[in-house]
Image (spheres, rainbow, N blue to C red):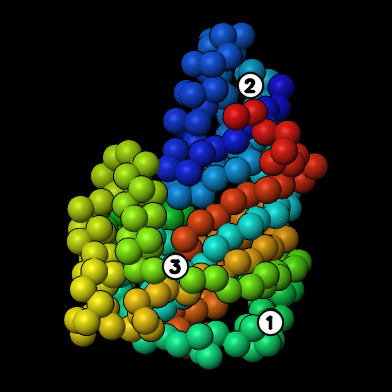
Amino acid sequence: MIYNLYKQRGETPLECIQRFRATHSEVKGDKFTYLGRLDPMAEGVLLVASGEDVSQTKREEFMNLDKDYDFIVLFGFSTDTYDILGRVLRVERLKEKDLDPVYINKVLKVYEGEREQKYPPYSSRTVEGRPLHEWSRKGEIDEIEIPTKKVTVHKINFHGLSKLSAKEMLGRLLMDVSKVQGDFRHHETMVLWKQMLVGLGSTNSSQINGGEVYLGKFSAHVSSGTYIRGIINDLGNTLGLGACALSIVRTRVGTYKIEDSVR
């Protein structure tokens, strides 16, 4: 049987299944197979199959379904994970005029269609028997060639800009990062974010025009295997501004929609 679960922000896929088991006694003894995964900071549709009879062919069929996402981009900041869980690597001084909607929409057209996407350095893709995130954590990522994968961006849309004060942004970061369990360098990550967002007169954080940060709202329809945070990082580089994922919500996998997910 296929289940359309809602993975919450901060949960791992395993924690999502454990929560499902705890609230649905009829599946407590069932074995589950993932039909796709989501990063800890992403939320939304997570498909899993129960039972022993899920063939590899059937699993691959579900794994290859196209997907829809809504996501919010934090402009001016680049991290090593391409999202807010990462170490801040780059900070840019921004003004609202740097984020011209006409130019952003023009750049997005470059991303539509088939393209080779490099796997994020912090991902589970294995190289020489080790996941990329292990190579990255040990500072050895430059010793290998990061593989690429052919993906298709069917459509990507920009829905406008918004702003948050640095104080509001820091509060949101603290709340979101605290939801993730396990060793994700939480302390180091938050120290760096605080340096950027607190004390706006300092050299490191004065890029925030008027004490504000800029957010962009986007949506995308993509093929299976597309890393949204990879697109966000590439977009920041193309714009010359830096960018990372603040939030990612998977709203559809094939015919399975977020409004039908079991929460």
Residue that badge 3 annotates: 164
Residue 254 versus residue 57: which sits nearer the camera? 254
Above or below, 13 against 26 in this view is below
Residue 80 versus residue 201: which sits nearer the camera? 201
The circle drawn on residue 14 is none
Residue at (22% x, 82% y) in the render: 201
Mark 3 or mark 1, which has the lower sequence index? 1
Nearest to viewer (mark 3 / mark 1): 3
**Image spot of residue 221 (x, y percent):** 72, 60
Residue at (41% x, 78% y) in the render: 76
Query: Which amino acid type is shown beneath numbered disc 3?
Result: Leu
Q: Tell me the quadrant of the picture where the N terminus can be found.
A: top right
The circle drawn on residue 105 is 1
Question: Of helix, strand and loop, which one carries label 1?
Answer: helix
**Image spot of residue 31 (x, y percent):** 55, 19
Asked if the residue under mark 1 is in contact with the one under mark 2, i.e. CB atoms within 8 Å, the reply is no
- For residue 83, side relative to residue 117 (left or right): left
Residue that badge 2 annotates: 50
- How dense is the environment of label 2, judged by Cα within 10 Å: few (below 14), some, or many (20 and up)? some
Nearest to viewer (mark 2 / mark 1): 1
Mark 2 or mark 1, which has the lower sequence index? 2
